[in-house]
Image (cartoon, rainbow, N blue to C red):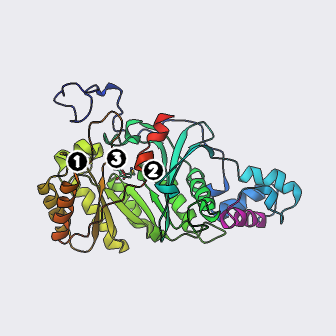
Amino acid sequence: MTTPAQPQVLPGHAPDAGDRPRLSFAVPRRGKPPRHLADLTSAERAAVVTELGQPAYRAKQISTHYFGHLTRDSGAMTDLPAGMREDLVPQLLPELLTEVRRLEADGGDTVKTLWSLFDGVKVESVLMGYSDRATLCVSSQAGCGMACPFCATGQQGLTRNLSTAEIIEQVRRAAVSCRDGELPGGPRRLTNIVFMGMGEPLANYRTVINAVRRMVDPTPDGLGMSARHITVSTVGLVPAMRKLTAEGIPVTLALSLHAPDDELRSQLIPINTRWTVGEALDAAREYFEVTGRRVSIEYALIKDMNDHGWRADLLAAELLKRGKGWVHVNPIPLNPTPGSIWTASDKDVEDEFVARLRSAGIPTTVRDTRGSDIDGACGQLAAEV
Ligand code: SAH
């Protein structure tokens, strides 16, 4: 539905904004997911097992099954006495994710799973197999409070934060799919994680950091993944970006910029009214300085919105102003969402945008549009159910 735009209304959207979410940091109060081993540090696990009347070393055994063998099936834990398998294991490894639906695209190389959580809330994750890696796109929140108008999840508002274990379970389930050869090409390892599913990871900061630690801690404390292969993507919550810088975990930081000027960015990314393009880029540059990790700038190319040649030049200038070699740009063809008339830029416009960045010396790679036919990038399946 499109009706004539009113002045305060974003082009491309129906002007009836009353039922569209506004930018919000409020986290709805809901029940908490059951406590799970993956929520806990190894010291906390030992303490909980002791509290439950068992020797602390049992925590390590169960962690080895969970993080090392990727199982929560107590029947497989033959090094535990039968009583413990029936009683202790279910208390530490409750079922957190139930598969609701699975969609495949790209000849099976892209698999999107819709999960139901303990309270019936739905989230999704997307597994993508490539020749040299397998990447899981995880959700960190159910819905999102950032209200970006081009993003399907942004249109849902925030339902709740996920727990650390709800994030880790998405990873474990994908790691099992990889190991069991569910992607074409046979058994492989899950190598990469991107926090680009539902939610703003830095708005669920502590939980996401704990999840990252569980991913990178060596087994049996964690999954033993490489921090460099984990990407945390943010709208640009500057104080949280600074906190992340100080954590000393060498994850890759991605900043969803989508416009180099405040006027347009404030329309596309409402949080820009609080932290500007300049502030977000300064924080991104600091991240590089401290961690040595090159930052990714995400830029969804939206036809006639942000894809002008002069905006490519302005983007290059804003980045170069802060130095060379610290950043690369990922233009992403827009994946159109229901209710929006926005669409992806024409190919020649995209090519020109990329060419201008490259000729300014900015490394630029167009993001592949994996799973766009199953709405792989943007929360549409969960929105639909
Ligand atoms: N909240 C985080 C993660 C969101 S999803 C963030 O904003 O960075 C990851 C990326 O997908 C973000 O860059 C987001 O802006 C982008 N995105 C969202 N909807 C999109 C769409 N319809 N088409 C293309 N990219 C989209």
Q: Tell me: is circle 1 under 8 Å from ligand 1.
A: no
Up the image or down, 336 lies above or below 39; here it is above
Label drawn at residue 197: 2
Span of residues in magenta: 57-71
**Considering the numbered disc 1 on the image, is that residue within a helix, a strand or a loop?**
helix
Disc 3 residue type (three-letter): Asn
Foreground: disc 1 or disc 3:
3
Query: What is the distance, in whole Å, between disc 2 and disc 1 at their CAs?
Result: 21 Å
Disc 1 residue type (three-letter): Arg
Q: Are marks 3 and 2 in contact (CB under 8 Å)?
A: no
Q: Which residue is mark 1?
A: 265
Up the image or down, 23 lies above or below 62; here it is above
Q: Is residue 202 visible?
A: yes
**Residue closest to the far right:** 82
Is residue 126 magenta-colored?
no
Label drawn at residue 32: none
